[in-house]
Image: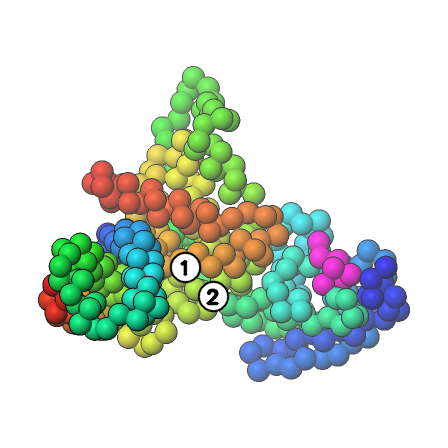
């Protein structure tokens, strides 16, 4: 057992969940509002680019998603597939990197 | 009066053999206040003396008669037929997650080996020649220990736990619950040693808090809460550099 690593992963999983909870709500409410209001892509971009809060919020959101998703994926892989510690860890780190790259690419586009 | 109380007989399917076994059907008279253990004992004494099962105290103290009854792990000596069988049908199998020995008897070795692996044994301090250790009954440690101490080692939580079925190395709810009582025992000389043994991917951090153990524990304990306590305390111990 890798005790210390597991303790830190447990803590980061909980902390990222605490961050995610309100941000997911903001994300969903904003999306529904934007769709209901009939905003076009150009209008949405105009709003996100004129207010720094959106890139900042989504910048935090992406870090939390990358951490939370990667730790969760690692656990699922270890429990549900023949992958052991190393294999599941490598895939989780790659997943984390992919989410960060794609996420910040998207944030860059709306900033 | 329930439907089962109006039935004069019970149809009972009992698992026979080891892993490659089969269900054998029996018809058993339905009695008032009859327990599942009464049913199994009737079958063994009146219908088929080759039936193997395990029991001892018959009053919910020893934890040896646990079986799977109509799909759920239960202590059979304290489980009334009328509570689990509304239609007069009972299916009795050995406990899940344990190697099957024969019929309803399972091999408990791995279960208790994990208590050892969890370092779930009391580590004595130097004897105090002045008298007994004083433990404040109102202290938070004593309250945490009291909430978890009444485990009878029946293995029902271990059978109810999906984590055990997914990860055979997982220490399981009972061993972790026991470790939690020791972490809160002010007389124990090595609380951090207990935390060190259970912190990790086969220990308390593997628990998903699904609470199968808690919902099935016949003593109404909450191993889930104990495991959550181990997670908290191991993090604090890590921050203090004691792990």
Query: Crowdedness of circle 1 by 10 Å Cα count: few (<14), some, many (20+)?
Result: few
Residue B200 on image: x %, y %: 31, 56
Q: Is residue B169 placed above or below A82 in the rendered structure? A: above
Quadrant of the rendering where the N terminus of chain B is positioned: bottom right
Q: Closest to the observer: A47 or B178?
A: A47
Query: Crowdedness of circle 2 by 10 Å Cα count: few (<14), some, many (20+)?
Result: some
Disc 1 target residue: B208
Q: Would you identify the image quadrant in which residue B87 lies? A: bottom right
Chain letter of the residue beneath label 2 in the structure image: B
**SS for tag 1?**
loop
Residue B117 on image: x %, y %: 38, 54
Q: Is residue B210 placed above or below A102 in the rendered structure? A: above
On the rendered structure, is B46 left or right of B84?
Answer: right
Q: Can I make out residue B54 in this image?
A: yes
Q: Is residue B198 placed above or below B8 in the rendered structure? A: above
Q: Which residue is drawn at 41% across and 36% down?
A: B184
Q: Can I make out residue A78 in this image?
A: no
On the rendered structure, is B229 left or right of A58?
Answer: right
Which range is magenta?
A: B78-84
On the rendered structure, is B87 left or right of B211?
Answer: right
Which mark is in front, 1 or 2?
A: 1
């Amino acid at each position: 057992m890798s005790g210390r690593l597991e303790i830190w992963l447990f803590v980061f999983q909980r902390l990222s969940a605490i961050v995610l909870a309100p941000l997911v709500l903001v994300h969903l409410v904003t999306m529904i509002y934007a769709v209901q209001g009939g905003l076009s892509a150009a209008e949405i971009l105009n709003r996100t680019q004129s207010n720094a809060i959106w890139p900042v919020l989504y910048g935090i959101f992406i870090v939390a998603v990358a951490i939370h998703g990667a730790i969760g994926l690692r656990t699922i892989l270890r429990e549900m597939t023949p992958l052991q510690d190393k294999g599941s860890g490598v895939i989780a780190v790659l997943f984390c990197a992919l989410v960060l790259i794609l996420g910040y690419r998207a944030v860059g586009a709306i900033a | 009066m329930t439907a089962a109380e109006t039935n004069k007989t019970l149809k009972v399917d009992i698992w026979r053999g080891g892993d490659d076994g089969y269900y054998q059907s029996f018809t058993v008279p339905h009695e008032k206040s009859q327990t599942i253990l009464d049913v199994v004992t009737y079958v063994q004494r009146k219908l088929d003396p080759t039936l193997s099962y395990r029991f001892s105290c018959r009053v919910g103290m020893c934890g040896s008669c646990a079986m799977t009854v109509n799909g759920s792990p239960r202590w059979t000596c304290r489980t009334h037929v009328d509570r689990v069988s509304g239609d007069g049908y009972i299916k009795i199998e050995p406990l899940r997650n344990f190697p099957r020995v024969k019929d309803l008897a399972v091999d408990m070795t791995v279960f208790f080996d994990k208590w050892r692996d969890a370092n779930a044994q009391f580590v004595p301090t130097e004897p105090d020649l002045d008298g007994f250790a004083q433990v404040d009954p109102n202290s938070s440690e004593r309250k945490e220990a009291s909430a978890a101490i009444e485990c009878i080692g029946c293995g029902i939580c271990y059978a109810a736990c999906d984590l055990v079925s997914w990860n055979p190395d997982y220490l399981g709810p009972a061993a972790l619950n026991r470790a939690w009582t020791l972490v809160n025992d002010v007389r124990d000389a090595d609380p951090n040693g207990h935390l060190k043994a259970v912190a990790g991917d086969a220990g308390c951090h593997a628990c998903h808090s699904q609470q199968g153990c808690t919902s099935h524990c016949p003593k109404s304990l909450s191993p889930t809460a104990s495991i959550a306590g181990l997670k908290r305390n191991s993090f604090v111990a890590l921050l203090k550099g004691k792990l």
